[in-house]
Amino acid sequence: MSQTNPETTPLHTLNPLTRFSDRAADYVNYRPSYPAAAIDIILEGLAPPTQLLAADIGAGTGISSRLLGKRGVRVIAVEPNAAMREAAEPHPLVEFRDGTAEVTNLADASVDLVTCFQAFHWFNLELTLSEFHRILKPSGRLAVVWNHRDQEDAFTAEYNELIRAASNSGQVQERIKSVKPILASLHFINITEHTFVHQQELDLTGLIGRTMSYSFVPRKGLMQQQLVVNLQELYQRFVNEHGFVYMVDNTSVHILEAIES
């Protein structure tokens, strides 16, 4: 009998459309944002923000969509998970729509910018890149963004080891930044990469809440209970006089230009 190898199983087959349904509240309250410099580089060289229409794909609860909206960009936030859409904080320039990366339901050549924040690894990449090229205007821009926990920071490195021990995150974390499909794509050219350091201030509730927002972390049972105990101990060793610890992320931004058809 053949067995599935979790290290090679495509991530888009691991129920990405529903796996965050029971984590929407933690996601909206505790997931980290993205540094202003990341938004700056995404918009650099484009038309004025008020003239842009962006599609934010896999938008979740709209963390990234609102950052673009605050710059004046009109945003269509495409998110297939109803619980995530319902938990999103509204913004006047952000419109949520049901859809997937592979089938956005957007018109041909209709958007100036496509963004994917912390979501690209969950997509069927071949279908997705074709779909992004279809909805982008000629020479439109694609920006793929990930937050990666900084292994040089002592607190963040220890936190990362706790997460690995308590979850099946290896297959996600080791493959989360794969840009090989983008490089091999016939739809995009002129890829550039930019990295920015971002720090999230967390109290104990926030630390546990951020952890529970990860789809690969257990939400009940003995492993979850032990993880919470370990997080409490880690917090006590690193907490400052104001009651906070600091998670350090390296935010990577990959920018690509759509090839004109």
Image (cartoon, rainbow, N blue to C red):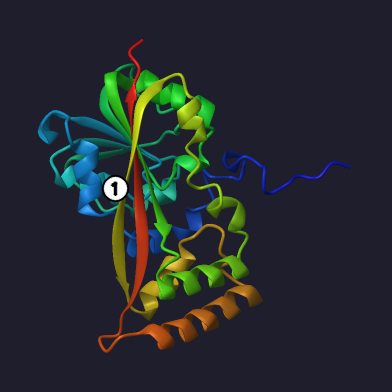
Left or right: residue 109 compared with residue 212: left
Outermost residue, right side: 1
The percent position of residue 188, horizontal first and vertical second, equals 39, 23
- Counting every numbered tag in the picture gives 1
Q: At x 89% / y 42%, what residue is drawn?
A: 1
Disc 1 crowd rating (10 Å Cα; few below 14, some 14-19, many 20+) is many
Q: At x 69% / y 49%, what residue is drawn?
A: 6
Q: Nearer the viewer, residue 184 or 258?
A: 184
Q: Nearer the viewer, residue 134 or 141?
A: 141
Residue type, mark 1 in image = Ser
Above or below 20: residue 26: below
Q: Nearer the viewer, residue 18 or 149?
A: 149
Residue 98's image quarter?
top left
Residue 236's image quarter?
bottom left
The percent position of residue 198, horizontal first and vertical second, equals 29, 60
Q: In which quadrant will I find the C terminus?
A: top left
